[in-house]
Image (cartoon, rainbow, N blue to C red):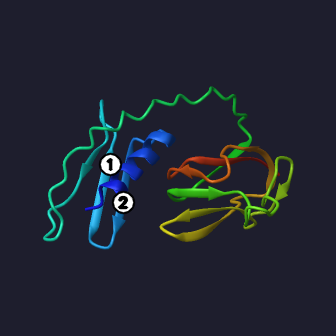
């Protein structure tokens, strides 16, 4: 068992205010969940893996309070369909897929979410104008997190 990997995953949780992280690779399955004090690694019994102990050197993930946003009723919230890292441009030196004020049609690619080393194009769900970009480039996102707010046509 690579304890550096567990510490790296716990650090990702801490930096992004996640409460649970489920990691699978081959026969390794790690679930980190923020308790009232510390994220704990839970490993299933596997023949080649030794028993894991709780990670105690990582402080608890900070509670991140969302700023109150007055969202208008006619804005569509485009949400991510999966957990991963969002990229707002096809490459680091390229222009972003969309910017605030851009008009999009349903099916237009508006960003990419990398999940488990797969790059998934995220298409606009509706026709409209991008009113707000709710995430930063290379930010880790959770399932159902709002990516964009779109004023529908």
Disc 2 residue crowd, few under 14, some 14–19, many 20+, Cα 10 Å: few
Name the secondary structure under disc 1: strand
- Front position in the image: 37 or 132: 37
SS type, badge 2: strand
| Placement of the N terminus among the 4 image quadrants | bottom left
Is 104 situated left or right of 16 in this image? right
- Residue where numbered disc 1 is placed: 32
The x and y percentages for residue 14 are 44, 40
The residue singled out by tag 2 in the image is 23
Q: Position of residue 82 (x, y in %)?
A: 51, 59
Mark 1 vs 2, N-terminal side? 2
Which label is found at residue 15? Answer: none
Q: Position of residue 130 (x, y in %)?
A: 79, 49
| Residue 74 appears left or right of 116 | right
Whether label 1 touches label 2, CB < 8 Å: yes
Q: Residue at x 35, y 38 (%)?
A: 58
Please tell me whether residue 139 is drawn above or below residue 25 in the rendered image.
above
> Residue 54 or 135: which is nearer the viewer?
54
């Amino acid at each position: 068992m690579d304890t550096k990997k567990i510490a790296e995953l716990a650090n990702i949780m801490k930096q992004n205010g996640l409460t649970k992280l489920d990691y699978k690779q081959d026969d390794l399955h790690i679930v980190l969940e923020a308790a009232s004090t510390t994220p704990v690694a839970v490993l299933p019994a596997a023949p080649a893996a030794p028993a894991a102990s709780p990670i105690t050197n990582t402080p608890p993930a900070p509670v991140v309070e969302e700023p109150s946003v007055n969202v208008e009723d006619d804005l569509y919230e485009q949400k991510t369909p999966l957990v991963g890292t969002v990229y707002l441009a096809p490459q680091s030196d390229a222009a972003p897929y969309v910017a605030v004020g851009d008009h999009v049609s349903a099916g237009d690619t508006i960003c990419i979410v990398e999940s488990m080393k797969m790059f998934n194009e995220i298409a606009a769900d509706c026709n409209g104008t991008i009113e707000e970009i709710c995430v930063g480039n290379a930010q880790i996102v959770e399932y159902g997190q709002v990516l964009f707010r779109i004023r529908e046509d």
